[in-house]
Image (spheres, grey):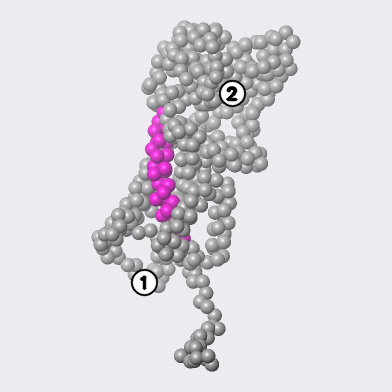
Amino acid sequence: MTIDERGAPERPVESTAAKPKRRTAPGWAGVRPLLMRLHFYAGVFVGPFLVIAALTGIAYIYTPQIEEAVYDHELHVAASDTWLPLERQVDIAREAFPEGALKSVRPAPTPTDTTQVIFTPPQATPSYFQTVFVDPHTGEVRGNLETYGSGQALPVRAWIDVLHRNLHLGEVGRIYSELAASWLSVIVLAGFGLWLSRRIALRRAAKRDKPTAEPSTEGAAKRGRTLSRHAVVGLWAAVGLLFLSATGLTWSGHAGENIGELRSALNWSTPSVSAAVDPSPAGRDVGLDAAREATARAGLTDPVEIRVPTAPGKAYVVAEVGRTWPSHADSMAVDPASGQVTDALRFDEYPLGAKLSKWGIDAHMGFLFGVPNQIVLTLLGLAIVGLVGWGYRMWWLRRPPMGGSPFGRAPARGSWRRAPVKTLVPILLVGAALAWFMPVLGVSLLAFLVLDAVIGWSLSDPV
């Protein structure tokens, strides 16, 4: 130490040498810790929502069989060669539910099915209708039930549908399902990145003849076995889980609106047949039977729904409503004055995006391929439950061996600092774009980051 002229010790001269640069790791080695932390926190916080969505989804896909069993009396009748005109069946249904406004009719597609006459009740809740089930051979009213949506869901299916979508909590509850659908794809992609980075590291180690470390403790061995199951199932289910995430978002409140706008911009919206016709001066109406006969001659096959004209100058619209493969979604408009088909829209004419949307939604709901579709969705749902369970088990097994914490250790903090800038910047840009497109994902991600920063500050641990 030296003394200056005033007798005070001189300050040491700061070195002019360059300060150490930001430490980064090359390639996947720099990205892996970041993916690990993202995968871990997303799994911990979003896991319960994923399990709820998976279990309620499994319940929903078997509702067709449940409906057939629970509502057998309303849906089925004894076969007969005698058929009542549709107009007569509608008159009978009106007597059973006189306060409703006729919306549409689904004629019995087979001799053992009932005709469904659909009414809009006064002061009806949006998407809810009242359906009268009529025996097409005798005119007997077999039931009068509340139905939901364009798929004519009966009460049991409607209840499970709403449970899966919003837990019967209204619009607030929809956030749960959107949160699950948004994060599912992020978790899957991060998990795939972790698997890929590990494969690359193992191959490089093998080329250098460097043996991999064996588990040194019983806990490490258990983690290894659990990780293996988690990775194998996640890898095999990855494509299906991404499919569920993408199609599930189409029903969401916030991301769903952005998806709709994107489809419109790409001209992928589902087209519709024109129902405009010249008003009949005498108010002539050929009726439901003539409208169905005209479309049958033009090639529309059962099952169909006939929507009645809503005002003068509007046509009957007859649309195929089958949801199995191959898809039948043709529709036609019939002039109520002349009984002539005025417009026709074939499914083959749909834009590719509209076809993919229909196929995706029908497959997501388990309708497209019938029982095989249901089996695949069940396996995917069980995969989600297993992946979340194994994830929590690995976290539990990471507890300190000497106690002190009821939870396992989280991946190391500050992992983003090791990622190369050329890799980190694209990740941030993609993340920002996804956060904007999927607002629930963006808000929840911001909440995670704030919480993580607060925890890090309280522990004096770098973020």
Instruction: Assign the magenta stretch its main secondary structure.
Output: helix
Residue topped by disc 1: 210
Q: Amino acid at mark 1?
A: Lys
Q: Secondary structure at mark 2?
A: strand
Choose between 106 and 301: the one closer to the eye.
106
Give left or right: position of 228 versus 31: left
Above/below status of 11 relative to 446: below
Instruction: Find the magenta span and give its range.
Output: 34-63
Expressed as whole percent of the image width and height from the top left, the position of residue 418 reads: 48, 67
Q: Which mark is residue 199?
A: none
Vertical placement of residue 122 versus 151, above or below: above
Q: Is residue 52 magenta?
A: yes
Q: Is residue 195 above or below residue 129?
A: below
Tag of residue 319: 2
- Which residue corresponds to the image point at 54% horizontal and 62% vertical from the top-left? 424
Would you say 121 lies left or right of 343 here?
left
